[in-house]
Amino acid sequence: MKLEKDETIFVAGHRGMVGSAIHQCLLKDGFTKVIGRSRSELDLLDRRAVREFFQKERPAVVVDAAAKVGGILANNEQPVEFLLQNLTMQNNLVEAAADFGAGKLLFLGSSCIYPKLAPQPIAEDSLLTGPLEPTNDAYALAKIAGIKLCQSYARQYGKNFISAMPTNLYGPHDNYDLHSSHVLPALIRKVHEAKLSGAKSIPVWGSGTPRREFLHTDDLADACLFLLEKYDQPDVINVGCGEDVTILELAETVCDVLGFEGTLEFDASKPDGTPRKLLDIAKIKSLGWTPKIPLREGIADAYDWFVGNQSTARR
Ligand code: GFB
């Protein structure tokens, strides 16, 4: 769908890691009416407030980058909140977008929607072909429900509501709380603090053998803009960088980029999660999009943000 530069675009979750990258990318690309609301301005869990907002603003395009997210431990410990809050927010947004005339909606899911033991790299048609990874099945089920809601609006009411599935993401505005964060910000913080304190090692959760794929949020934002303009199908589409690393390799890379020469101590009491999660990105590549930010460069960028924003970063 061709987007006019003065189209009103609502980025839900524009203060978060993903939403802020998308918001910035749209502004940089010349869109003049990109709107966002902080949590205190608009509580996405409040259906009435969401409907009032849509009735007043009538965005032509909606990007749903609002979600309760967290790393393996947070997902494992709070399945109720991950399921309920994500279902409620996405239901409120998608329903209001449909009822108040949005011409396009982009719903962002996650690679954890695919079965735990899906063939690698994971193609889009693996969805709902096997059991989920138990540490994040609540979050995954909420995201699958969001996909189905968008597909149902497309099927029943002809809405141009699309769903993209990003791989594990990182970038500026990440969560650096060691209990609830994802692995990459956790390793950046641990290595940074070990350098400052002179510690000889850092703890790394699990065995170090799981494989993960990491995409910088600027690459994701670029893909989102590409999909808004070029993709009009209800079928999900993967967004990844096409390569994965073991957690051991990731930790070694973080140590190297940050200049830390200590050792890694693996903590087997923490869960490994799914053994491998590499997305097949042939579909988005065939449409003409490719990732651009190499992992080392992306880690250096995330680290710069962390160092420059320590007083405000979530930690
Ligand atoms: O990033 P992460 O928390 O989430 O963990 P998932 C990835 C891997 O890194 C796991 C290991 O094998 C962890 O055990 N790991 C090593 C660490 N050290 C650390 C550490 O200090 N902190 C963390 N957090 N992990 C998430 C899902 O799964 O992926 C979400 O829980 C979401 O639902 C997200 O889908 C993309 O990749 O395992």
Image (tube, grey):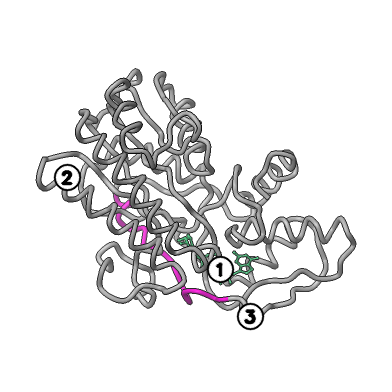
Say which element carries label 3: loop
Q: Are marks 1 and 3 in contact (CB under 8 Å)?
A: no
The residues tagged by marks 1 and 3 sit, at their Cα atoms, a distance apart of 22 Å
Q: Is there a contact, CB below 8 Å, between mark 3 and mark 2?
A: no
Foreground pick, 83 / 308: 83
Q: Position of residue 19 (x, y in %)?
A: 47, 39
Which is more N-terminal, label 2 or label 1? Answer: 2
Check disc 1 and give the amino acid type.
Val
Q: Whereabouts is ligand 1, in terms of quadrant? A: bottom right
Indicate the quadrant containing the N terminus: top left, top right, bottom left or bottom right: top left
Residue type, label 3:
Ser
Q: Is residue 215 above or below residue 94?
A: below
Whether 202 is drawn above or below 215: the answer is: below
Residue on which disc 1 sits = 245
Ligand 1 within 8 Å of the CB at mark 2: no
Residue identified by numbered label 2: 153
Q: Position of residue 59 (x, y in %)?
A: 30, 26
Assess disc 1: are there few (<14), some (14-19) or many (≥20) residues with their C-alpha within 10 Å of its C-alpha: some
Q: Real-space Cα distance between discs 1 and 2?
A: 37 Å
Pick out the residue farthest to the left.
156
What stretch of residues is rendered in magenta?
271-286
